[in-house]
Amino acid sequence: LTERLLEMSVWDFVGLNETAWVDVPRIEELQAAPFLPDSLHASLRAYRDLPCTSAPHLTERQIALGALVEQLDQLDLSSHLRPLQNWLMQLARRKSKYLECLSQIFKENWHQSERLDGYLNDRSDLKDQHLLSLHLTRDRYHFPERSVFWGNYAMECLDPCHRQLPEMVRVWHDENSQVPYLLWLEKFSGHQHDRWVRYLTLAEQSELEIKCIDHRLCKLSGRPLSCPERQHFIFIIDLQGRLFATRADPHLSHASFTRGRAVLASGIFQANQGNLTHLKFESGHYLSALPHWWQAIQLFEQLGVTWKEGLRVTVFDRFRYISTKISPVAMASRVSFQAALGL
């Protein structure tokens, strides 16, 4: 990661896939502190005394963590203290990587809203300028069925660990804090925010592209997509019209495929031997509406999909779910599609 970041001229928002935001503890928080050497006490205090609300101190903090790792590595502690020693080294290394990511963000000014907006709203890859693009949800909504808030996914995109923190963004706004959001977060315990999303590299993304072979959705290997009744695939169609899909995973979202960039369609589907059995237009990250749903239908057809009897279509209009079986005839036009959904 270190070598890759040094070579990067533009921050690509792939980030870290671990709880790297958790900081090393203060010496006072360690029950074993009386058994640790005074030199380690001094190093921990020196690191924790450095300001964490200012970007210029990020490099100093990285240097201090590097020195702490080197010191821990050279310590010859008794056997019962070695688990603590290894744990502290692991925390320090992860935190150093996290600070390195933050340094890159501030160096390239990605924390400035104009720069981030340019990244999120970029349509340069759009194959047809008449197509509608979906962008990460910037507003904050309450999801009554799950009793949670969602939204502010631009902040998730910027966070090196891609934590789902819409509530914390609201608190930051309400405080009118002058501290940049990513540095402001450090005063909170990372253990309370362990929900994060894994962003895929370009190589990982390419492996998940789906092709249509003989009107059936297939992996690049040619194997038709299938899933049990209680499982599903998440999918997006990127600005170039390519379909990407993967089995649902707690740490994967629709934003994972394009690392937060705009898409043409997003949702969930179930398939049996490559034939779609359930198409569900639900995505918190890319909140869509009727024009996007109909556009997705057309894009699937362009890929080579043919609609079968018994296909169930489910849509979410921000307030309710509508789910019904739709015949191939109803998929012939936007008017008949809309009528079949009862809209």
Image (cartoon, rainbow, N blue to C red):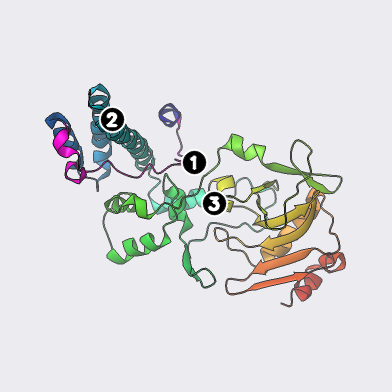
64 or 74, which is in the foreground? 74
Q: Position of residue 126 (x, y in %)?
A: 65, 49
In this view, 184 is above or below 60: below
- The amino acid type, in three-letter code, at marker 1 is Val
Magenta range is 8-36
Dominant SS of magenta comes to loop
- 40 to the left or right of 217: left
Crowdedness of circle 1 by 10 Å Cα count: few (<14), some, many (20+)?
A: many
Residue designated by label 2: 82
Q: Position of residue 128 (x, y in %)?
A: 70, 51
Under circle 1, the secondary element is loop
Crowdedness of circle 2 by 10 Å Cα count: few (<14), some, many (20+)?
A: some
Residue designated by label 1: 14
In this view, 213 is above or below 38: below
Name the outermost residue toward the front: 80
Callout 2–callout 3 Cβ contact below 8 Å: no
Q: Dividing the picture into quarters, in which one does residue 101 lie?
A: top left
Q: Earlier in the sequence, mark 3 or mark 1?
A: 1
Q: CA distance from mark 1 to mark 2?
A: 33 Å
> Which disc number belongs to residue 250?
3
